[in-house]
């Protein structure tokens, strides 16, 4: 675990980033309970508001529409909602404006998983991850490695290999709890 933190988290949103399928939603929900914060999954918010799944949105409106919508939701969250735990989609941090807003206004946690461990999850992800459709395993590995360089911009990195979702959530809570105890509203 690497912590790059110069200011307390306080009432900032805690943003979870990482490759698709790393467990951001599951871990986020668990960490939110432990830290007494509300949880927001940006993809689920978009699906709820548009009444369609992300794969349907990709198919009907295109990836460009989805990325624009995603950016609007995340920027709004960064600027107006506080004290939340927020799960971002795996590709959202590729957008420079999202990256800058999150790093400026939030506390960003990179949930890191090795390729070998991630690859074991691929069969569970194929149906609901349009970005994986029609890609070879080599192309997915290239995408995985490309995104790792973007995820390098964070405040805290947690290696999730060999840890359960509960253990990762405990790690987040243990790392941030002293701040949250100091800044209870």
Image (cartoon, helix red, strand yellow):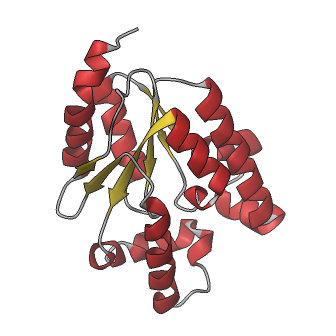
Residue 43 visible to an observer of this rendering: no
What residue is rendered at 54% in x and 38% in y? Answer: 104
Residue 1 at x, y = what percent? 22, 52
Residue 117 placement: quadrant: bottom left
> Which quadrant does the C terminus fall into?
top left
Residue 126 at x, y = what percent? 51, 74
Residue 101 visible to an observer of this rendering: yes
Say if 127 sits above or below 180 in the image.
Answer: below
What residue is rendered at 27% in x and 39% in y? Answer: 172
Residue 80 placement: quadrant: top right
Say if 84 sits above or below 126 in the image.
Answer: above
What residue is rendered at 34% in x and 21% in y? Answer: 36
Quick check: 161 left or right of 144?
left
Say if 41 sits above or below 157 in the image.
Answer: above
Total count of labels: 0
Q: Nearer the viewer, residue 7 or 99?
A: 7
Residue 86 at x, y = what percent? 49, 39
Q: Nearer the viewer, residue 132 or 64?
A: 64
Quick check: 50 left or right of 149?
right
Residue at the extreme front of the image, as rendered: 6
Residue 49 at x, y = what percent? 72, 39
Q: Nearer the viewer, residue 152 or 62?
A: 152
Quick check: 99 left or right of 149?
right
Quick check: 105 left or right of 80?
left
What residue is rendered at 61% in x and 33% in y? Answer: 77
């Amino acid at each position: 675990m690497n912590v790059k933190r110069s200011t307390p988290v306080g009432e900032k949103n805690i943003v979870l980033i990482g490759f698709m399928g790393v467990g951001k939603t599951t871990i986020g929900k668990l960490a939110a309970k432990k830290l007494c914060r509300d949880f927001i999954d940006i993809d689920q918010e978009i699906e709820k508001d548009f009444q369609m799944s992300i794969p349907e949105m990709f198919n009907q409106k295109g990836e460009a529409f989805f990325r624009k919508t995603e950016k609007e939701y995340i920027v709004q969250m960064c600027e107006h909602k506080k004290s939340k735990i927020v799960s971002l989609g795996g590709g959202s941090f590729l957008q420079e404006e999202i990256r800058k807003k999150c790093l400026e206004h939030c506390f960003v946690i990179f949930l890191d998983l090795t390729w070998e461990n991630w690859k074991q999850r691929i069969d569970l992800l194929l149906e609901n991850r349009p970005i994986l459709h029609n890609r070879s395993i080599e192309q997915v590995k290239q995408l995985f490695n490309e995104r790792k360089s973007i995820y390098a911009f964070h405040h805290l990195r947690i290696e999730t290999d060999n840890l359960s979702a509960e253990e990762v959530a405990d790690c987040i809570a243990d790392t941030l709890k002293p701040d949250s105890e100091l800044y209870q509203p």
